Amino acid sequence: MRFSRRSYLVALALGLSLAWGTIHTPSLVVLPEARASLAVLDVFWTEHFLCLYGVAIDRHVLVTGTGPGITSTRSRGGKFWISTVTCPKEAIGSAHNHPNGERCYFYFPGTVVATADEVTFRGSGQRLSIIVCRDHLVWDVQ
């Protein structure tokens, strides 16, 4: 994947601010092209996935692009389908939508109890997980 000059400049700015210690909380920067791809997920009535590409430094992430993952579908009990999406090693994470913008959180509200999204993310070994919920992104970084 080729990075544009703008991507490098944003990554450099993010790196410099980290070096000077001006950012103490996790941060997410999504470039316009990647944000447009994520916005497309919101139009689906079923759950869809994308792999995320970019740079991760500690808990600070710059997303420069997206791409499809490798999907394998298997049946369980003949009543519903379970899909597994795998992203290449170069990916820093994955994104998926929640149809109708419902249940957009990694921990159940008011608790420290992890949702299935959080449990899956923590077990994936990826750095970033994004849930697309209508007009906003809910994200977690490790």
Image (tube, rainbow, N blue to C red):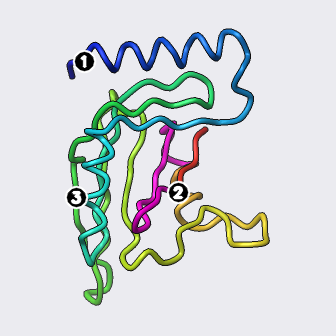
Q: Residue at x 58, y 29 (%)?
A: 60
Image coordinates for residue 6, horizontal then vertical, percent? 32, 18
Q: Secondary structure at mark 1?
A: loop
Q: Is 133 on the left-hand or right-hand side of 87?
A: right
Q: Earlier in the sequence, mark 3 or mark 1?
A: 1
Relative to residue 104, is residue 96 depicted above or below?
above
Q: Is residue 106 left or right of residue 53?
A: right
* Tag 2 near tag 1, CB within 8 Å: no
Q: Residue 12 lies in magenta, yes or no? A: no
Provide the residue designation for mark 3: 72
Task: Locate residue 30, reporting x and y percent.
Answer: 41, 38
| Residue 130 belongs to the span the image colors magenta | yes
Which residue shows up at 78% across the image and 64% down it? 112
Q: Which image quarter: residue 88?
A: top left
Q: Which residues are magenta?
A: 123-137
Tell me the crowding category of disc 3: few under 14, some 14 to 19, or many 20 or more residues within 10 angstroms, Cα based.
few
Figure quadrant of residue 135: bottom left
Q: Could you tell me which residue is drawn at 37 percent across and 64 percent down?
A: 97
Residue 4's tag is 1
The residue type indicated by label 2 comes to Val
* Distance between mark 2 and mark 1 Cα atoms: 26 Å
Residue that carries the numbered disc 2 in the rendered image:
138
